[in-house]
Image (cartoon, rainbow, N blue to C red):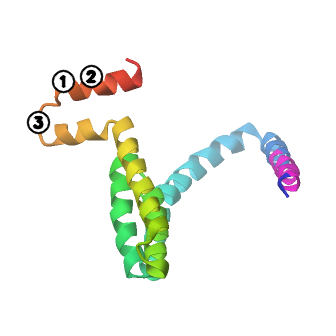
C-alpha cells in the first residue's frame, strides 16, 4: 500500500509541476495575487471556525476541550486548528471510555506538547512582558542556553 501511494504521489507531483510550468508567467503573477490571500483567509479564518463548530457538534466534552486547547494553540502557535483537533480527540476519548489510562496519557502528552511548544516559541517570556513585568535573568539564560545563543 505504501509503495502504491508513493507511486501515485510521484505521478501527481510530476503532473502538478508540469502543469505549473505550462502556465505563462503573467498569469502566474495574477494567480498568486488572487490565490495567496484566499488561501490565507481559508487557513487562518475559515478552518478554525469549521473545526470549532465540528467540536461543538461532537458533544459537550469535545466542545469544551476543543475550546480550551484551540484558544491556547491560537495564543502559542498562532493557529487554533491543532488545538481544536487535539481537543476533539480528548473529548471523544473521555465521552466514550472516561478518564482511563489512555486518556490520561494522551492528556499528559498534549499538556507537555503545549508547554514545550510555548517554551521554545518564547511564549512564557512574552506573557511576562505583556503584564509589563521584567523577565527574570535566569529565564532568559535558560532560553539562550536552549536556543544555542
Q: Dot 2, how many residues are within 10 Å of its Cα: few (below 14), some (14-19), or many (20+)?
A: few
Q: Is residue 5 magenta?
A: yes
Q: Position of residue 87 (x, y in %)?
A: 43, 66
> Is the C terminus in the top left, top right, bottom left or bottom right quadrant?
top left
* 17 sits left or right of 72 in the view: right
The answer to which image quadrant residue 141 occupies is top left
SS type, badge 1: helix
Of marks 3 and 1, the one in the foreground: 1
Give the alpha-carbon distance from disc 3 to disc 2, as whole Å: 17 Å
Quickly name the residue at label 3.
133
Evaluate whether residue 46 shows in this view: no
- Give how far apart the Cα atoms at labels 2 and 1 are: 6 Å
Location of the N terminus by quadrant is bottom right
Drawn side of residue 125 relative to residue 27, left or right: left
Asked if disc 3 and disc 2 are in contact, CB closer than 8 Å, the reply is no
- The residue depicted at 83 percent of the width and 49 percent of the height is 6
Task: Looking at the picture, tell me which residue is in the foreground, 145 or 128.
Answer: 145
To which residue does mark 1 refer? 137
Instruction: Kindly identify which residue carries mark 2.
Output: 141
Placement of 26 over or under 44, stated as above or below: above
83 over 92 or under it: above or below = above
Please give the name of the residue rendered at 70% of the width and 40% of the height, measured from the top-left corner. 26
Residue 98 % position (x, y): 43, 77
Amino acid at each position: 500500500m505504501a509503495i502504491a501511494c508513493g507511486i501515485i504521489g510521484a505521478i501527481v507531483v510530476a503532473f502538478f509541476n508540469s502543469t505549473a510550468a505550462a502556465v505563462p508567467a503573467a498569469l502566474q503573477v495574477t494567480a498568486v495575487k488572487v490565490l495567496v490571500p484566499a488561501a490565507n483567509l481559508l487557513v487562518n479564518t475559515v478552518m478554525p471556525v469549521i473545526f470549532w463548530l465540528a467540536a461543538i457538534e461532537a458533544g459537550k466534552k469535545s466542545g469544551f476541550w476543543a475550546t480550551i486547547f484551540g484558544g491556547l494553540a491560537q495564543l502559542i502557535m498562532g493557529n487554533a486548528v491543532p488545538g481544536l483537533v487535539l481537543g476533539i480527540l480528548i473529548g471523544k476519548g473521555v465521552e466514550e471510555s472516561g478518564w482511563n489510562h489512555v486518556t490520561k496519557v494522551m492528556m499528559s502528552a498534549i499538556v507537555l506538547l503545549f508547554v514545550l511548544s510555548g517554551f521554545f516559541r518564547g511564549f512564557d517570556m512574552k506573557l511576562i512582558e505583556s503584564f509589563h513585568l521584567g523577565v527574570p535573568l535566569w529565564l532568559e539564560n535558560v532560553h539562550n542556553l536552549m536556543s544555542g545563543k
